[in-house]
Amino acid sequence: MKLLVTGGAGYIGSVVSALLLEAQHEVVVLDDLSTGHEDAVPAGARLVRGTLRDTAAEVLGGAGFDAVLHFAAKSLVGESVQNPALYWDKNLGESLALLDAMRVTGVRKIVFSSTAATYGEPESTPILETDPTRPTNPYGASKLAIDTALGEYARLHGIGGVSLRYFNVAGAYGTLGERHTVETHLIPNVLKAAGAEDGEPVKMFGDDYPTPDGTCIRDYIHVEDLGRAHLLALDACEPGAHEIYNLGSGTGNSVREVVEVCREVTGRDVPAEVAPRRAGDPAVLVASSDKIQSELGWKPEHDLRAMVGDAWTFIRSR
Ligand code: UFG
């Protein structure tokens, strides 16, 4: 297939681009390089630099595209609370421009990178796709609005869409890993403390949550397992239908457990200290991924230890 990957210079988009190329697809990456890296675009993919609003119609109009995989987005929860307009504009606004470019040019399939943040604070765990969506920040709200728009474009314009709701993505795939200028995620921050010569500890945000060890529990999923789900989702796009699948490993690990696994994998005495709670963190977020496992035959193959090991190898190679 000839595929457009928006945000293919970012962490997840670049890994999925690499997997698509390995599966013999033709890949064109569209990325404005605002947070992505040109050298993360895998060899064999063509990079077009631009925003969706300015360039999606032109690129798709070049004909012959079979589908779009849409990763380009702003993804910092804290930033979205400070500057909601940026998230509505860049996430929802640019996605609408992309959907409309697809409608006009007749491209019929899209796999979209949605998020667990669409659910907000869950009433029960593990989270099912049918659970209420009550996002607690503009980032999650903007992604939920795109899921809704995808449903409308499927119903009204015959597009086939799949939204994959990611839980906590971690790890690396070969030379492709997390390289955020502002790093907010737990595993890279713990590994930074593992490698730091100044002994700067990683902060564990809150140890008074209603969990067994008092720290927050999350569902970590290896970026390669996550990436492979996109190939299955692509095949599952049915014209006129929009499906939503959670993507997590179905097991929860606490912040303290993650720090402990990082100590074991790196063999280093990772300094860590308890800090106040971070605003807006739910105590427990764990996915049910029964739907994607039973309907698309996906299953996670890497555990937390493998995620930490691959992320550590990636960090030390840079
Ligand atoms: N944490 C720390 N110290 C750090 C970083 C994080 O203790 O230095 C804690 C957080 O408080 C949280 C857990 O580690 O309890 C995981 O935090 P991350 O920032 O790694 O991930 P989140 O669960 O906050 O966010 C992830 C995605 C978001 C998405 C969200 C959906 O990264 O894009 O899940 O719930 F919005």
Image (cartoon, helix red, strand yellow):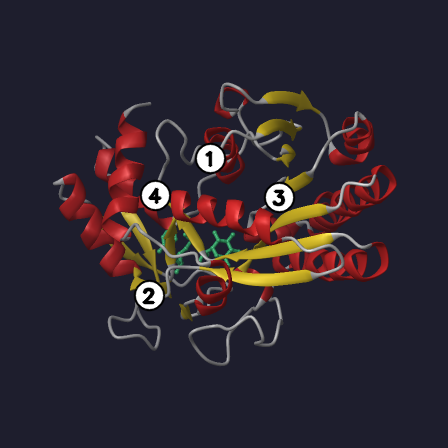
- Compared to residue 314, the image places residue 145 above or below, namely below
Relative to residue 117, is residue 278 drawn left or right?
left
Q: Is residue 93 positioned above or below 199 on the image?
A: below
Circle 2 crowding by C-alpha within 10 Å: few under 14, some 14–19, many from 20 = some
For marks 1 and 4 on the same chain, the one whose residue lies earlier in the sequence: 1
Quick check: which quadrant has ligand 1? bottom left
Residue in the foreground of this view, choosing between 41 and 90: 41
| Residue 5 visible (yes or no) | yes
**Residue corresponding to mark 2:** 252
Give the Cα distance between marks 2 and 1.
Answer: 26 Å
The residue at the point 82 percent across, 41 percent down is 106
* Marks 2, 4: nearer the viewer: 2
Q: Is mark 3 within 8 Å of ligand 1?
A: no
* Mark pair 2, 4: CA separation: 19 Å
Nearest to the observer: residue 25 or residue 27? 25
- Seen in the picture, residue 60 relative to 140 is either above or below; the reply is above
Q: Give the number of the mark in front: 3 or 4.
A: 3
Q: Earlier in the sequence, mark 3 or mark 2?
A: 3
Residue where numbered disc 1 is placed: 19
Tell me the kind of residue under disc 1. Answer: Leu
- Residue 192 visible at all: no
Between marks 1 and 3, how big is the CA–CA gap?
23 Å
Which amino acid type corresponds to the residue marked 2 in the rendered image?
A: Gly
User: Comparing marks 3 and 2, which lies closer to the viewer?
Assistant: 2
Disc 2 C-beta below 8 A from ligand 1: no
Residue occupying the point 77% across, 58% down: 154
Q: Which comes sooner in the sequence, label 3 or label 4?
A: 3
Q: Nearer the viewer, residue 190 or 113?
A: 113
Ligand 1 neighbours mark 4 (CB distance < 8 Å): yes
Q: Element type at marker 1?
A: helix
